Image (cartoon, rainbow, N blue to C red):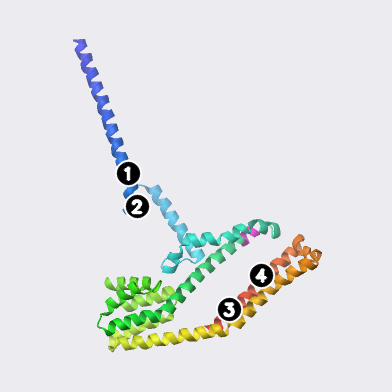
Amino acid sequence: MLGIVLLSLLMTIFSLVTSVVLLYRRSMATERREGRFEAELGAYRLRALPVTASGRLDHLRAALNLSAVTARVFGFRPESYAHMQAGMKRVVGFSAILPVVGLVPGLLLIGPASPALLLVLWVILGRLAFRIVDRRYAAKLFQQLPDALGMIVRSLRVGIPLSRALIIVGQEAEYPTADEFRMISQDVAVGKNLGDTLHNLAERTGLQEYRFFATIMALQAQTGGTLADVLASFADMIRQRIAARKRGHALASEARMSCYVLGGIPFAIGGIMSIINPDYMAVFLTTHMGHMLLGVSALMLGLGFGSMRFIMKRSLG
């Protein structure tokens, strides 16, 4: 009797162990299969955040706050298509190259205050880089606007509706006008007002011409009239403005060359003096007073160069 009980107990234990092993192997196979699916399809599906993972949500919230603060400090605007194309991490990273390279020379020349100055320089370079991105992006849009308006005019004159004309510009125009008009056509397709969409584009890019374009569309919707003729006149006016700006840049070439020559004279004189009288120039490199004079000279030279550039841009604007 005891033998039968022991045999039954052993069989039960064996069955339990076998079941556990089989379940473990099955779970491992399922996990490996899901891992393969995750590796193949994980980049193409949106995973929901676990509600109970408060720690992960806190980390995510902190990361988003840090990104928002960084974007505000460096002048990054997520609503700007040009900034999204450039990328905040890329621009901020490239802006850090000069401060990182100048850290050791700054410690030797300026002292303990150099990290704070280099941090300020990093922020200034980042904001300057985003301003350059904005300026180049707006310049391309301004140069391409007459051609985009010409496409719309030709489409309207052959009987194509305005919504379809915007889609054609988004397909046929060059970058970045094609991308902007593609977004405009998508906004109009979901029911947004064309004038409001163009006003938003003008706010993002800082182009007054798109604000005029939005005003033309709003007036035409209220008063009627031949939209193709109005847009054709507007395109001709913009072409005349582009031609006038190019003539202004050509006339200002002498002033730009004078600016570059005046900015390069101190470096040329310093190099010549280093060759003629090295001991005279060594004072600027070996003494603390010389380091301060070099810093003040570089600051004044930068201010003078920036002032000349500002005057030329204001006169051309």
Mark 1 / mark 4, whichever is N-terminal:
1
Report the residue marked by disc 3.
Answer: 310
| Residue 31: image location, x then y, percent | 31, 39
Mark 2 / mark 3, whichever is N-terminal:
2
Q: Real-space Cα distance between discs 1 and 3?
A: 58 Å
Q: Magenta residues? A: 113-117
SS at badge 2: helix
Vertical comparison of 33 with 150: above or below: above
Report the residue marked by disc 4.
Answer: 299
Closer mark to the observer between disc 1 and disc 4? 1
Closer mark to the observer between disc 4 and disc 2? 2
Vertical comparison of 95 with 183: above or below: above
Q: Real-space Cα distance between discs 1 and 4?
A: 58 Å
Q: Real-space Cα distance between discs 4 and 3?
A: 16 Å
Q: Is residue 246 left or right of residue 272?
A: left
The kind of residue tagged 1 is Arg
The kind of residue tagged 4 is Leu
| Residue 123: image location, x then y, percent | 55, 64
How many marks can you see?
A: 4
Q: Are marks 1 and 3 in contact (CB under 8 Å)?
A: no
Closer mark to the observer between disc 2 and disc 3? 2
| Disc 4 packing (10 Å; few <14; some 14–19; many ≥20) | few
